[in-house]
Image: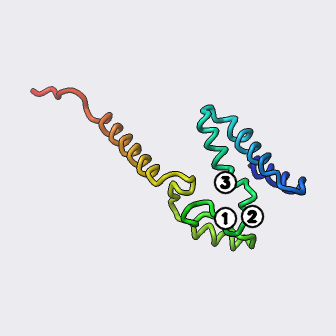
C-alpha cells in the first residue's frame, strides 16, 4: 500500500515523472529493507525497473516476451477487470523474466519436499514379531 501511495504522490507532486526516484523508493526502501541478500536486492531493483520506466507509457511496451503481460490502456474499471480475466490463471516464469526452466526447478523441488515428508512419516526399524 505504501508503494501505491508513493506512486500517487510522485505523479501528483511532480511535473515530470521521477522514474529513478520511484524505483529507488520502492525497491530499496520499501522492499530492500526487508531483503538481506545482495543478489535478491539487485533482483528486486531489476524487476521493478521494468515497471518504473518511461517505456511503460508506450502502447507497444510489453512486460513479457510473449506479450501477454502489458500495461493496459487507460479505461474503465470494467476494462481493467476484462484485461485481468484474460491473464493466465497460473503465471509462468516469464512474468518475472525468468527462464522457463525456473518452473521446472520449482516443481522438482516441490516434489522432492513431498517425498522427504512421506519418507519421514514411514515407520522406522523392524516390527516386533511374536
Q: Position of residue 70 (x, y in %)?
A: 64, 64
As drawn, the label of residue 121 is: none
How far is the residue under mark 2 from the one under mark 1?
8 Å
Q: Residue at x 57, y 66 (%)?
A: 68
Residue at the spot of label 1: 61
Query: What secondary structure is marked by label 2?
Result: helix
Q: In the shown orientation, is residue 56 left or right of residue 13?
A: left
Q: Is residue 106 left or right of residue 40?
A: left
Above or below residue 124? Residue 113 is below
Q: Determine whether, in the image, residue 48 is placed left or right of residue 5.
A: left
Residue at the (60%, 33%) spot, across then down: 37
Given residues 68 and 30, the one toward you in this image is: 68
Sequence-wise first label, 1 or 3: 3
Disc 1 + disc 3, Cβ < 8 Å: no
Q: Report if residue 85 is visible in the image.
A: yes
Q: Which mark is residue 50?
A: 3
Sequence-wise, the earlier of marks 3 and 2 is 3
In the image, residue 54 sits, relative to residue 85, either above or below, namely above
Query: To which residue does mark 2 refer?
Result: 57
Say if mark 2 contacts mark 1, CB within 8 Å. yes
Screen quadrant of the C terminus: top left
Q: Residue at x 60, y 38 (%)?
A: 40
Viewer-side residue, 123 vs 83: 83
| Crowd band around label 1 with a 10 angstrom C-alpha radius: few (<14), some (14–19), many (20+) | some
Amino acid at each position: 500500500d505504501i508503494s501505491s501511495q508513493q506512486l500517487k504522490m510522485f505523479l501528483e507532486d511532480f511535473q515530470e515523472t521521477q522514474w529513478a526516484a520511484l524505483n529507488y523508493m520502492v525497491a530499496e526502501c520499501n522492499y530492500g529493507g526487508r531483503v538481506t541478500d545482495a543478489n535478491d536486492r539487485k533482483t528486486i531493483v531489476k524487476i521493478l525497473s521494468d515497471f518504473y520506466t518511461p517505456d511503460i507509457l508506450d502502447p507497444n511496451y510489453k512486460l513479457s516476451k510473449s506479450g501477454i503481460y502489458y500495461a493496459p490502456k487507460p479505461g474503465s474499471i470494467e476494462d481493467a477487470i476484462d484485461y485481468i480475466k484474460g491473464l493466465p490463471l497460473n503465471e509462468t516464469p516469464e512474468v518475472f523474466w525468468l527462464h522457463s526452466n525456473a518452473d521446472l526447478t520449482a516443481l522438482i523441488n516441490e516434489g522432492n519436499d513431498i517425498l522427504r515428508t512421506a519418507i519421514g512419516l514411514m515407520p522406522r526399524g523392524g516390527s516386533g514379531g511374536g
